[in-house]
Image (cartoon, rainbow, N blue to C red):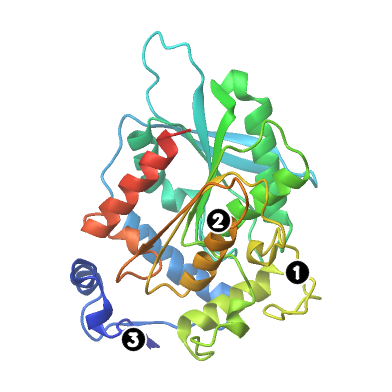
Amino acid sequence: MSSITATPPSQFDPEYLQWLMSVFPPGATLPSFNTVPEMRPSTEGMIRALYATFPAQPSITQTTHTVTSADGTPIEVLRFSPPHPAGAQEATPAILHFHGGGHVANNVSMFAPALAELASLTSIPVFSVEYRLAPEHPFPAALEDGYAALTWLSTSAPSLGIDPSRIAVMGESSGGGLAAGLALMARDRAFAPRVKKMLLVYPMLDDRSITLNPAWNPEDRTVKMLTMCWGAYLPAHLKAGDPEAKVSPYAAPGRAEDLAGLPEALVEVGTLDELRDESVRFAGRLGEVQGAKVELRVWEGVPHGFDAAREIGVSKRAVEGRVAFLKGL
């Protein structure tokens, strides 16, 4: 078991700490996991409970579409549609979303309250991919699922009422890594029209962090979980975290040597997030590319997944920034 307050309280944003203590009382502990099957029920239950507190969005319509992945597997894409103004003729932008869960856990329905909120705040339909999970389906299954969804979204644009030249890819945590990997894949496959924007929320980008980050304690609960998740996601012949391993940049975008030609990007992460350094490094490298448009937002005093605390100031500012970025599609 691991203490919920391993980080000194003084380092937390005061509002976030107050919220944290209301959700996890003093002395509360988090279970540790050695396998993905052990991890899934606990993390999924916690996430469902947190997102169940989000306000309902009765104006948002949810529908399910089925697309076919590269290997013939049917994949669901859940659509969250805001009301279309009466008489409106113009096609709308679209957001292609990937949920978090370390590549090994969770599903779209768990994040439905947040996705409905996003569709409502942006007035843009959100399409979230029910991609396959590792270790049952290691890389590249999830990314090929994402590429199939992007292809379907673009080719079906007329019937969906969307503009294929105004598509953003986004995700949180491992979903952010998938969004970045998809942007790289779409660039290299000369996908057209090009993806317009990329929103990476505390993204999981680089397996090498589990071995090369000097600030990481290999016995820390979160580091152990990340090591387990990367090990499940990457093909068995690759050793997660090995700098010499031939890991595809589509799997670990932080390894990509060439970041030219990627969409306009917004990258955000908290100062207490274990993924902070790789997020900052990736955004910095993007910013070095000639002609690239990238904005990095580092939120003080909050850890991974901080925006589950929707009513605190830092979360409100983060959501407002995401909405403004996406409304620019």
Task: Look at mark 3 in the image and give the residue it sits on.
Answer: 6
Compared to 262, does 274 lie above or below? below
Mark 1 neighbour class, 10 Å CA radius: few under 14, some 14 to 19, many 20 or more: many
Query: Which of the two residues, 108 or 87, is positioned nearer the viewer here?
Result: 87
Asked whether the beta carbons under mark 1 and mark 3 sit within 8 Å of each other, the answer is no
Sequence order check, earlier mark of 1 and 3: 3
- Disc 2 crowd, CA 10 A, few/some/many (<14, 14-19, 20+): some
Tag 3–tag 2 contact (CB < 8 Å): no
Q: Quadrant of the N terminus?
A: bottom left
Q: Is residue 10 rendered to the left or right of residue 126?
A: left
Sooner in the amino-acid sequence: mark 3 or mark 2: 3
Q: Which mark is residue 287?
A: 2
Residue located at (24% from left, 68% from top): 16
Give residue 294's mark: none
Q: Secondary structure at mark 3?
A: loop
Does 26 sit above or below residue 247? below
The disc placed on residue 247 is 1
Name the one closer to the observer, 56 or 198. 198
Amino acid on which disc 2 is placed: Gly
Task: Name the element at disc 2.
Answer: helix
Note whether residue 176 is visible. yes
